[in-house]
Image (cartoon, rainbow, N blue to C red):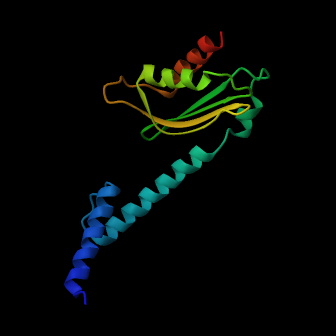
Amino acid sequence: MVSREQKRGSLQEKFQLLRSITNSHAENDTSIIMDASKYIQTLKQKVERFNEGPTAEQSSSEPTDPTTPMVTVETLEKGFMINILSGKNQPGMLVSVLEAFEDIGLNVLEARVSCTDSFSLHAMGVENEEGENMDAEAVKQAVTDAMRSWLG
């Protein structure tokens, strides 16, 4: 039978693990739980933004030429959300985009890519430690330039 002290010790270990995962500086259990709740809400918002496709106003401004890619970049708390949509996939397009990320010093943390008939890339990236500070417009310009030079 597990003693009450062992259960309490196990519970405290779990609180410390939760505290470290959520980067909480709280000392008491209630505050650790509140910080974890805020952290989960932040993660949920990031997932929702990541899972959102282009909004109605973005899709209405979509180029009429299916080979012209539409690039949108959103600044997140730490990093960027990059969306690239093109009506037609062409061999080498993904490689071109990933090389552009590498050239500007952007580390991709998570990405979803579809290269069947059309091309779609949704990626979350952060700048590497040695990279210069960059903004969303610089990321968008680098990706757009890479796509243009690749297309011809």
Quarter containing the C terminus: top right
- At a point 24% along the width and 80% down the height, the residue shown is 8
Q: Is residue 37 left or right of residue 141?
A: left
Q: Position of residue 135 (x, y in %)?
A: 46, 26
7 lies above or below 103? below
Residue at 56% x, 16% y: name it. 146
From this viewpoint, is residue 89 visible?
yes
Taking depth in this image into account, of 24 and 112 the one nearest to the observer is 112
The answer to whether 8 appears left or right of 64 in the picture is left
**Residue at horizontal 53%, vertical 24%?**
137
Q: Residue furthest top?
A: 152
Residue 107 in picture, x, y percent from top left: 42, 32
Task: Write the residue at 61% across / 46% down.
Answer: 51
Residue 19, quarter of picture:
bottom left
Q: Residue 114: percent from the left, percent from the top?
A: 65, 36
Image side of residue 139 versus residue 151, left or right? left
Q: Nearer the viewer, residue 102 or 54?
A: 102
Q: Is residue 3 above or below residue 48?
A: below
The answer to whether any part of residue 140 appears in the image is no
Tally of numbered tags:
0
Is 11 placed above or below 131 here?
A: below
